[in-house]
Image: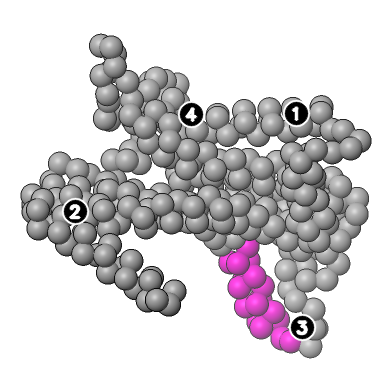
């Protein structure tokens, strides 16, 4: 039997088992009590309100603090244990370091002094987003809506959640990067020359109205950058979590079809591996690379 035939036979058997389970278990009807959006609901764990502003500790704050501690502790731990003859862990760290230093920072900020100055920020941005994304796929006992009784204690159930799946975190990171490259551009060129540099070269002969129109388009693009930066990161991480949630059993619970879980669970595992292996790293790479590009563009001599 050929490999192709074996694959189709396995798929047929798998679908056949799903159909049999569907006939045996039946359909319990739509589950009105299960609300998938509640998986991302932020209930305050410790309520704190100062001057009318909510500073409560919730799941997003916990993941944010966890990612910060992990980023700082990992970098400090590895930096203090660098060896002349590196082991496998150090070699992996050096590869990531080289990626951030040369490909992301120096590759997009031609000025050597400027690249050296902004490397700590861009590296910190990359590692923080990377750890935040990876932590989002680690099941932790953070679901306080559903609890489990263990020896009389009501403990939170396991759940996956990421700080970057909350739009406020990517927005703050994007705003900091946006302010950073504007400040650097103004510091190097001056306020009005920096604004004038938004116009592309070669428009000297164009009439003032045409220049004004192009400048306004460029200005809009600068204001849109924080939105594109934050939404890209937020949407990709949130979409990945939703796909895993539905494929891992959420869809079966929502529709009342227990047998559907047998069909969708392998897809959940595939999405899980894909998100950890590619999306988590790719989104950190894109965010930090665009930040470096914006800083390099703001300080470049030409548009």
Q: Is residue 135 visible?
A: yes
x, y percent for residue 22: 14, 57
User: CA gap, disc 2 to disc 1?
Assistant: 48 Å
Q: Which residue is mark 1?
A: 76
Q: Tag 3: Cα neighbours inside 10 Å, few (<14), some, or many (≥20)?
A: few
Label 2 secondary element: loop
Q: Tag 1: Cα neighbours inside 10 Å, few (<14), some, or many (≥20)?
A: few
- Nearest to viewer (mark 1 / mark 4): 1
Which of disc 2 and disc 4 is earlier in sequence? 4
Please identify the residue farthest to the top as the structure is shown: 152
Magenta span of residues: 206-223
Report the disc number at residue 274.
none
Which of disc 3 and disc 4 is earlier in sequence? 4
* 94, 265: nearer the viewer: 265
Q: Which residue is mark 4?
A: 62
Which of disc 2 and disc 3 is earlier in sequence? 3
Q: Which residue is mark 2?
A: 259
Q: Main secondary structure of the magenta part?
A: helix
Rendered view: 38 above or below 256: above
Circles 4 and 3, Cβ within 8 Å, touching? The answer is no
């Amino acid at each position: 039997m050929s490999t192709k035939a074996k694959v189709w036979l396995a798929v047929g058997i798998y679908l056949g088992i799903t159909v049999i389970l569907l006939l045996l278990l039946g359909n319990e009807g739509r589950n009105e009590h299960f609300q998938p959006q509640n998986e991302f609901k932020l209930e305050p764990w410790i309520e704190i309100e100062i001057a009318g502003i909510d500073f409560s500790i919730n799941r997003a704050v916990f993941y944010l603090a966890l990612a910060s501690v992990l980023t700082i502790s990992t970098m400090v731990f590895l930096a203090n244990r660098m060896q002349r003859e590196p082991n496998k862990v150090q070699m992996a760290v050096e590869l990531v370091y080289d990626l951030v230093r040369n490909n992301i920072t120096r590759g997009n900020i031609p000025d050597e002094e400027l690249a050296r100055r902004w490397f700590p920020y861009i590296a910190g941005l990359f590692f923080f987003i990377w750890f935040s994304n990876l932590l989002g796929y680690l099941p932790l006992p953070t679901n306080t809506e559903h609890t489990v009784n263990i020896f009389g204690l009501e403990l939170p159930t396991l759940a996956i959640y990421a700080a970057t799946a909350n739009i406020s975190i990517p927005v703050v990171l994007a705003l900091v990067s946006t302010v950073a490259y504007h400040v650097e551009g103004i510091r190097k060129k001056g306020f009005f020359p920096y604004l004038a540099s938004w116009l592309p070269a070669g428009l000297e002969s164009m009439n003032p109205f045409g220049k004004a129109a192009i400048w306004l388009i460029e200005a809009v693009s600068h204001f849109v950058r924080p939105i594109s930066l934050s939404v890209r990161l937020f949407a990709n991480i949130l979409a990945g979590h939703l796909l895993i949630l539905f494929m891992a059993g959420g869809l079966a619970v929502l529709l009342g079809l227990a047998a559907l879980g047998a069909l969708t669970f392998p897809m959940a595992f595939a999405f899980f591996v894909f998100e950890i292996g590619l999306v988590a790293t790719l989104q950190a790479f894109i965010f930090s690379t665009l930040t470096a590009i914006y800083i390099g563009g703001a300080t470049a001599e030409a548009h």
